[in-house]
Image (cartoon, rainbow, N blue to C red):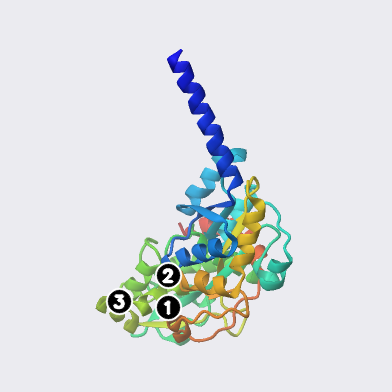
Amino acid sequence: MHRRQLLCISLTLAGLSGAAVANEAVLNIYSARHYQTDEALYANFTKQTGIKINRLDGKEDELVERIRNEGKASPADLLITVDAARLEVADNLGLFQPVKSAVLEARVPAGLRTPTWFAFSTRARVIVHNKADVKAEWVQTYEDLADPRLKGQVCMRSGAHPYNLSLGAALIAHNGEAKTEAWAKGLVANFARAPKGGDTDQLRAVAAGECGVTISNTYYLARLLRSTKPEDQQVVKALGVVWPNQKTWGTHVNVSGAGVLKHAPNRQAAVKFLEYLASDEAQAYFANGNNEWPVVKSAVAANPALDALGSFKPDALPIGDLAKTTANAQKVFDRAGWK
């Protein structure tokens, strides 16, 4: 009898607790971003709206798998992650729901949103070379990296990484699948070593003379530029940066973005948060958190490191179109031997 009474009491408390939570304005975010500046962003949203944010940070693939496993019971309202390829993976799995918002349509450029997810900051994928070993004029385009004169000079991270798959998707869109495969084969033939590590590892390898040229996202360069460590400043001094394809289709651009999840229990709060991310104030926090550029034209994010890299012509390919071609890029890279 005693055990039965305790069970009833526990169930009653659980019900009361659930009712309290249900009455509280909350937003549950699964995020692959975890930057210090984001803390102010979340705090300001709560201050403005009274909506409490519960956040679960994790790696992109792990969060997507978690959402899939949780199904309809998932408490998550929003997924925030980086790279169009990853956003498209989540979309293809049916994890997002369509969002119609006059605010988002007015502030986020059409080429940087889809019916189900929105970009809130951008980064560019640039060519970086050792100034002593590789001349800038040799590497003015992504296509130049397959030139035989760079044999033994190219360092790259895995071809299976979303950053490179998104670039491959852009090349397919502009040059066609056959030419992109020929390019990838030429690139592989120029490798100084088997692909390994991340973008920062490639930058350090180029600076050390292990190879002569690589491709990197701009925020990795910005981090090194902003670093006060002497060893990082030595890396920066050895490197030259080229904005690729300025005379053709422009430098490849990718994004950080977010979408409302299909089974979001707090959909209204989720849409409100996306609209907040498109405000000038939030854009500055969101972009600076990872040394990126805001997507909203009126937003200003003062970042001396990015400013030092100069201006460039970006690729105008809609980010949604780019994302849909990443699966083809993976097949092309596999055939070319870029693992």
Amino acid on which disc 1 is placed: Val
Q: Is residue 147 visible?
A: no
Q: Which mark is residue 224?
A: none
Look at discs 3 and 2 and give the one toward the viewer: 3
Counting the numbered discs, the total is 3
Amino acid on which disc 2 is placed: Asn
Q: Position of residue 284 (x, y in %)?
A: 52, 74
Mark 2 element type: loop
- Labels 3 and 2: the sequence-earlier one: 2
| Image-based side of 229 in relation to 98, left or right | left
| Image-based side of 210 in relation to 189, left or right | left
Q: Residue at x 53, y 38 (%)?
A: 17
In which quadrant of the rendered view does residue 73 lie?
Answer: top right
Mark 3 to mark 1 CA distance (whole Å): 15 Å
Taking depth in this image into account, of 182 and 95 the one nearest to the observer is: 95
Q: Position of residue 220 (x, y in %)?
A: 41, 72
| Badge 2 density bin: few <14, some 14–19, many ≥20, Cα 10 Å | many
Q: Which mark is residue 190?
A: 2
Mark 3 element type: helix
| Badge 1 density bin: few <14, some 14–19, many ≥20, Cα 10 Å | many
Amino acid on which disc 3 is placed: Asp
Taking depth in this image into account, of 68 and 242 the one nearest to the observer is: 68
Q: Residue at x 44, y 86 (%)?
A: 308
Q: Position of residue 85 (x, y in %)?
A: 57, 59
Q: Which residue is label 1 attached to?
A: 128
Mark 1 element type: strand
Q: Which mark is residue 232?
A: 3
- Is 303 rendered above or below residue 321? below
Mark 2 to mark 1 CA distance (whole Å): 15 Å
Q: Are marks 3 and 2 in contact (CB under 8 Å)?
A: no
